[in-house]
Image (cartoon, rainbow, N blue to C red):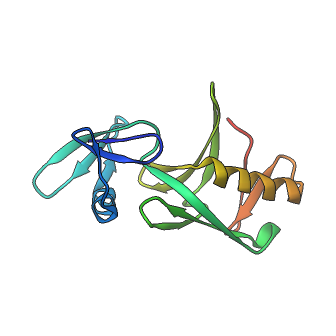
Amino acid sequence: MRIARDGTWFHEGSPISRPAMVRLFSNILRREPDGSFVLVTPVEKLDIAVEDAPFTAIAVKSEGAAQNRTLAFQLNTGDLIVASRDHALRCEERDDGPHPYLTVRGGLDALISRPVYYELVELALAEGHDPAGLWSAGTFFNFEPV
């Protein structure tokens, strides 16, 4: 099995087209101490290749402003995650540009899709923080790539 960079799940080379199956698999996905990914069932542990991050943030809803803002992200699995101290936002600089992420759980991240990232950048620029970033659930997230 494999999860492509765009969040598409594959089994034996074919995309998994049933959202319920992807959601089921996402619930048993774990990150090993060595950084690899596995699906853990009651009887076995199966390796799964992940090209970037196992989840993709496909939408964001912003409520409030400045320190009273809350950013809720919808993942490609249908899950909703509010950016907070426990679900941090970060941006990594790579050769092909910035890669923004949201911490989901237990070492598992969601790659924030480009349209959602641009929406966040617009909000951050409008607020004029230096460094550029946004508040969510009482935590400030710096958008400067590391």
Please report the residue visible at 70 percent of the width from the left and 37 percent of the height from the top: 145
Does 99 sit above or below residue 142? above
Q: Is residue 118 left or right of residue 65?
A: left
**Is 115 or 56 nearer to us in this picture?**
115
Task: State the image coordinates of residue 93 (x, y, percent, origin top left).
Answer: 65, 32
Please report the residue visible at 20 percent of the width from the left and 44 percent of the height from the top: 46
Task: State the image coordinates of residue 105 (x, y, percent, origin top left).
Answer: 44, 57
| Quarter in which the N terminus is drawn | top left
The image quarter containing residue 116 is bottom right
Is any part of residue 83 visible from this angle?
A: no
| Quarter in which the C terminus is drawn | top right
Does 109 sit above or below residue 77? above
Please report the residue visible at 87 percent of the width from the left and 58 percent of the height from the top: 126
Please report the residue visible at 40 percent of the width from the left and 40 percent of the height from the top: 4
**Is 59 or 27 nearer to us in this picture?**
59
Q: How many marks?
A: 0
Q: Is residue 70 left or right of residue 27?
A: right
The image quarter containing residue 3 is top left
Does 128 sit above or below residue 131? below
Task: State the image coordinates of residue 110 (x, y, percent, origin top left).
Answer: 50, 51
Task: State the image coordinates of residue 128 (x, y, percent, origin top left).
Answer: 89, 54
Q: Is residue 37 left or right of residue 46?
A: right
Is any part of residue 90 visible from this angle?
A: yes
Q: Residue furthest top?
A: 95
